[in-house]
Amino acid sequence: MSKKCMINRELKRIRVARKYAARRIELKTQMRDESLSPEERQRVMLKFHSLPRDSSPVRQRRRCRSTGRPRGYIRKFGLSRNRLREVAMRGDVPGLVKASW
């Protein structure tokens, strides 16, 4: 099980990213707008850089839904490799069977 503070930090990043998503898009389009003067674009860039770092969705890390483990995450199931193996062995994932050849 992952530390609660790390899981809460990820949840905070998600909240902040959602809060500033529209603002980020607006500022990015203004920064790319060639019709604005260089001074105006510079001012917009400073506003963009003044946003919180966690407002960027790139900083988010996918975590296992049940354990919070950040590594070995499998997107299709939303679980880490360890938990997926346990769940698959119990037969809780339909259509997923252990490979044997």
Image: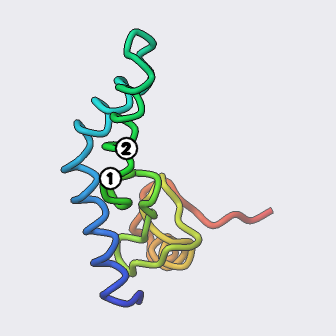
- CB under 8 Å between discs 2 and 1: yes
Q: Quadrant of the C terminus?
A: bottom right
Residue appearing at x 50%, y 73% in the figure: 70
What residue appears at the point 39 percent right and 78 percent down from the top-left corner? 68
Helix, strand, or loop for circle 1?
A: loop
Residue denoted by label 2? 46
Q: Nearer the viewer, residue 7 or 95?
A: 7
Residue occupying the point 44% across, 70% down: 91
The amino acid pointed to by label 2 is: Leu
Furthest toward the front, the residue is 39
Relative vertical location of residue 95 with respect to residue 80 in this rendering, above or below: above
To which quarter of the image does residue 46 belong? top left
Q: Position of residue 8 (x, y in %)?
A: 27, 78
Marks 2 and 1, how far apart in space?
A: 6 Å
Which residue in the protein does label 1 denote? 50
The picture places residue 73, in percent across and down from the top left corner, at: 53, 66
Determine crowd level at label 2: few under 14, some 14-19, many 20+ residues with C-alpha closer than 10 A. Answer: few
